[in-house]
Amino acid sequence: MKEMTRWEDIKRKAQAEAMAKYGDLIDLPHPVSKKHPPLSAAQRAAQFSPFAALTGYEEAIRETAREVSLEEDVERELV
């Protein structure tokens, strides 16, 4: 029971601190851009889709695998 009260006190303190810092912003309306129309849900989702952070990485991996395979083939032929 004491543990729950402790966490409740921590939560209340955090909420009070947040209100002290940002209370003046809570009731402001959501800003709407005059320059940019809102994105559709699909457009917003696309912003977070996977992307190739390292351009050419996959090709480099394939090339290395090809070279290793060729070296193994040569070694087998020599034996």
Image: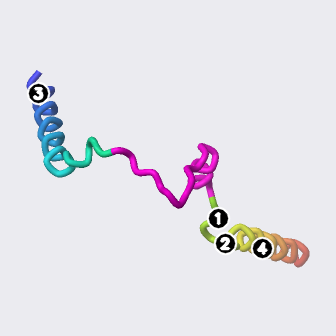
Residue 58 location (% of width, % of height): 71, 67
Q: Are marks 1 and 4 in contact (CB under 8 Å)?
A: no
Q: CA distance from mark 3 to mark 4?
A: 60 Å
- Between discs 3 and 4, the one toward the N terminus: 3
**SS majority, magenta:** loop
Q: Quadrant of residue 40?
A: top right
Report which residue position mark 1 lands on.
Answer: 52
Mark 1 Cα shell of 10 Å, populated few (<14), some (14-19), many (≥20): few
Alpha carbon distance from label 1 to label 3: 48 Å
- Residue 53's spot in the image, x, y percent? 60, 67
Q: Which residues are magenta?
A: 29-50
Whichever of labels 2 and 3 marks the residue nearer the N terminus, that label is 3
Location of mark 4 (residue): 63
Mark sitting on residue 19? none
Residue 33 is left or right of residue 13, and the answer is: right
Q: Would you say 56 lies left or right of 2 here?
A: right
Marks 3 & 4, CB-CB < 8 Å contact: no
Q: Secondary structure at mark 2?
A: loop
At which x and y percent is residue 17? 14, 46
Residue count near mark 3 (Cα–Cα under 10 Å), binned few <14, some 14–19, many ≥20: few
Q: Is residue 30 magenta?
A: yes
The residue drawn where x is 16% and y is 33% is 7
Q: The residue under label 4 is which amino acid type?
A: Glu
Circle nearer the N terminus (2, 4): 2
| Residue 52 image point, x, y percent | 64, 64
Q: Residue furthest left?
A: 2
Residue beneath label 2, please?
55
Indicate whether 48 appears above or below 6: below
Nearer to us: label 3 or label 4? 3
Residue named by callout 3: 5
Q: Amino acid at mark 2?
A: Thr
